[in-house]
Image (cartoon, rainbow, N blue to C red):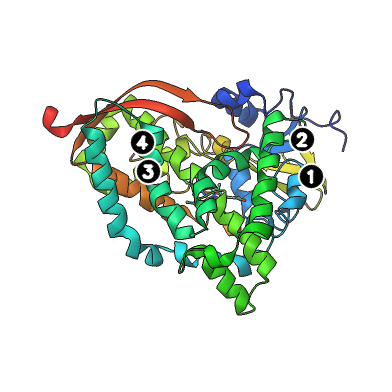
Amino acid sequence: MSATSVIPAFRRDFWSDDVILDPYPVYRELRDLGPAVWLEANGCWALTQYATVRAALLDPQTYSSASGCMMNAPMNTATKGIMLCSDDPEHLAMRRLFAKPLQPKALIEHRRRFEDLAKERILELLARESFDAVADLAHFLPLAVVTELVGLDQYGRDNMLDWAMGIFNAFGPEDNARTNDGIALAGGVIDYVLNKLDRANMVAGGWGEALFLAADEGRISEQTARMMLIDYLSPALDTTINATSAAIELFAAHPEQWSRLRADPSLIPSAINEVIRLESPIRAFSRLVTRDHAIGDAQLHKGDRALMLYACANRDPRHYPDPDRFDIARGAGDHLGFGQGTHVCAGMHLAKLEISILFEAMLPVVAGFRTGKSERRAHNTLRGLYSLETTMVGAEEL
Ligand code: HEM
């Protein structure tokens, strides 16, 4: 398609460090340019406003995932067959299997264990003068429990966090250093699941083993079972980790919101939604446009690539009044931080459970947070902190 004939257009590289590290003014500019904006430097569309992104996610016939959700051909080819990168009915058949252990009912059996681990960790951190809210707190539950529940072999468990952190960089555009590093890493992960992983070494009763058992029953092929492991590997850790550290950062900056949550813990689900709305851990995935159509002044053509800007939509003032304000009672349960429609996050109940349990463990004993130095690094897909110096103020200290 001819970019020059298209309005509205955005000229800066959407994957440049400055755009990634300071995204919110850019999102505002994009939303104000229009509901669909041509990213001239990247050769793709960005869907920007809440109503447009939501409508597109609910229309997988027009916005297909089967040609990949990434911004480069090598990854879109290499990930063919994973659940994230397929359309219904194939997608739904995989999803029924995959999401079974991630439903609220199935997760109940893990709640007590998560609670005990969380309580112990919070008391330990409370006793410290300061700690890193990313490495010491946000990593804790996902690493302690999720790696075990997925149940890879020891090599897989040892590497899962690094894979999860790096692999989403491979979603970026070609000719981008982070994308190239991510692709190299993703190649190793695909080789591991397809060729190196011996199912005999997996944890019995784990989610990964269940995929192989489904293959034994002929419900999916063994190749599909192996590729589906990637759906557990990449999104299960760092997304939740980033949401957790964002929560600490937000509550430190808005102590009145923490006090409000302490006074009314029934706001926990709403608070989690508000954190994910405001600091959406995944900024965008892409789709392939399957038919010519117009959105406002923009003419999209079959074969174009369109980015679903979840993070941008979540701060759209057309949908959320005063969208940059952190308000745990906002009731933002309709945010797009977990996606929407057939590909809506398959792990969102697990993510919410983990964060909820951390809040429940902190509320009775933590009166507030003081934060110091933090580090944020540019990442092609994820928004999150790499470190956040934190002190928890004990409730009895007040
Ligand atoms: C706060 C934490 C999380 C956030 C913000 C998040 C975000 C998202 C988003 C935006 C999507 C939509 C993809 C699309 O539109 O194509 C998605 C899908 C997905 N997520 Fe999550 N996620 C989180 C946690 C998890 C966890 C803990 C898992 C664990 C297994 C997980 C597994 C998946 C899978 C498998 C998909 C693909 C679903 C499908 O294609 O049907 N996510 N997630």
Q: Answer left or right for 304 relative to 310.
A: right
* Residue holding disc 1: 73
* Residue holding disc 3: 140
Task: Give the residue drawn at x 49%, y 59%.
Answer: 150
Mark 3 / mark 1, whichever is N-terminal: 1
Q: Foreground: 371 or 196? A: 196
Asked if marks 2 and 1 touch (Cβ < 8 Å), the reply is yes
Asked if marks 3 and 4 touch (Cβ < 8 Å), the reply is yes
* Residue holding disc 4: 136
Give SS at disc 4: helix
Mark 2 / mark 4, whichever is N-terminal: 4
Distance of label 3 from label 1 (alpha carbons): 35 Å
Asked if marks 4 and 1 touch (Cβ < 8 Å), the reply is no
Q: Residues within 10 Å of mark 2 (few under 14, many from 20)?
A: some
Mark 2 / mark 3, whichever is N-terminal: 3
Distance of label 2 from label 4 (alpha carbons): 34 Å
Q: Residues within 10 Å of mark 1 (few under 14, many from 20)?
A: few
Q: Which mark is residue 168?
A: none
* Residue holding disc 2: 174
Q: Residues within 10 Å of mark 4 (few under 14, many from 20)?
A: some
Q: Nearer the viewer, mark 2 or mark 4?
A: 4
Mark 4 / mark 1, whichever is N-terminal: 1
Distance of label 2 from label 3 (alpha carbons): 34 Å
Image coordinates of residue 231 in percent, x first then y, are 59, 55
Task: Give the residue drawn at x 73%, y 38%.
Answer: 45
Mark 2 / mark 1, whichever is N-terminal: 1
Distance of label 2 from label 1 (alpha carbons): 8 Å
Q: Answer left or right for 327 relative to 42.
A: left
Q: Quadrant of the C terminus?
A: top left
Q: Foreground: 47 or 84? A: 84
Specify the amino acid type for callout 4: Asp
